[in-house]
Amino acid sequence: MDKQDYYELLGVSKGASDAEIKKAYRRLAMKYHPDRNPDDKDAELKFKEISEAYEVLSDAQKKAAYDQYGHAGVDGQGGFGGGGFEGGFSDIFGDVFGDIFGGGGGGRRRSNVRRGADLRYNLDLTLEEAVRGCEKTLKVPTYVGCEPCGGSGAKPGTNAKTCGTCGGVGQVRMQQGFFSVQQTCPACRGEGKVISDPCNSCHGQGRVEKTKTLSVKIPEGVDTGDRIRLSGEGEAGSHGGPAGDLYVQVNVRQHPIFERDGQHLYCEVPISFVDAALGGELDVPTLDGRVKLKIPAETQTGKMFRLRGKGIKPVRGGAIGDLMVKAVLETPVNLTKRQRELLEEFQSETKGHEKHAPKSHGFFDSVKKFFEDMT
């Protein structure tokens, strides 16, 4: 009986990619595997057929020969219909499903050397420290390489031995009927090596806990959310592997006077109603000291003044920001009798004159019109 077309067996088109062919085989292999269909000869035959199809279509040379000559181009080159399936279909099945069951890779040896984990350190800064830059000393609890054993985990003068169970691969193959999978070696737990005489300092781990003291330079202009990377200052790797990195996460504490928005600073400055009306000068704080700010006559509360170049230099470069000063009118309190008399006299002089309070008259005229329109 003529063999069925390999592409039809897997349910893919002739132009299917390697990933599509592999995906189709996975789906069908799980459906027809003998372990899932005990005593079902038809399922067993179907499984062998799709495994043969995948064995040919997953190999570039065999696939090219099949595409050109059909079954005649691959018979005797490893298919079930020829000189036997090299290694058996259980090997193909193990290769395809190895990433699910922790297998794959055949007899490749696993390395027990692994990179250490990255660490994060939260660093609080004042606004002044963030703007000007500074140098900080950090105390970081971490794992460091064990000095007596040099990170190997074995007692000085000895070495770890290749695991006799897995031969240093770190995995063992388990055969269950037609189903062959690889599992982590129970003897060495996937390391590939066994330490018979562990180091007394690290107890075979190759690293020990320690609090490291580090000095980190904070550049000018950093802000909350910025991150500084210290390469190789994270946890030590296992069995002499490279260390991870330390990431310093910056948080700028709230300032009692200034608020920051990128490279700009904002602050509020109270002014008396006399200075607001007549004009004057105010002492305004900046990060570099006090400066004089001229207040023009008839300044209204909420007026914003810009002091150019009194902000922050961005950490990634660019122009220095500005300081935005908001004038906030302060109402006088604890008035003396004479002060009250003067204010009452001032009130009588200005009451009813629109030119002295144009905003108030405009507002109340709008309110009056609003209620008139409602009637």
Image (tube, rainbow, N blue to C red):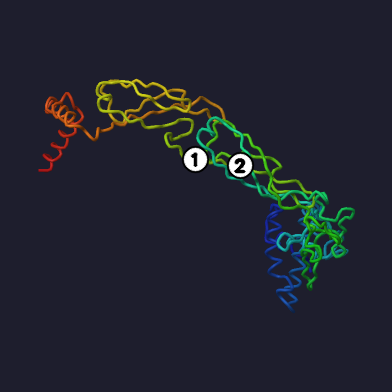
Question: x, y (%) of residue 73?
Answer: 83, 56
Local crowd size for mark 2, using a 10 Å CA cut-off: few (<14), some (14–19), many (≥20): many
Left or right of residue 80: residue 324: left
Residue 253 is marked as: 1
Q: Is residue 213 above or below residue 207?
A: above
Q: Quadrant for residue 298, please give it.
A: top left
Q: The residue under label 1 is which amino acid type?
A: Arg
Q: Is residue 113 above or below residue 51?
A: above
What is the secondary structure assignment of the residue under circle 2? strand
Local crowd size for mark 1, using a 10 Å CA cut-off: few (<14), some (14–19), many (≥20): some
Query: Do we see residue 291 in this rendering?
Result: yes
Which residue position holds label 2? 248
Extreme residue toward the left, this view: 375
Left or right of residue 23: residue 250: left
Q: Is residue 131 above or below residue 19?
A: above
Query: Do we see residue 72 in this rendering?
Result: no
Left or right of residue 208: residue 82: right
Question: x, y (%) of residue 32?
Answer: 71, 70
User: Which dot, 2 or 1, sits closer to the camera?
Assistant: 1
Residue at screen point 44% across, 31% down: 265
Question: x, y (%) of residue 251?
Answer: 53, 41
Q: The residue under label 2 is which amino acid type?
A: Val
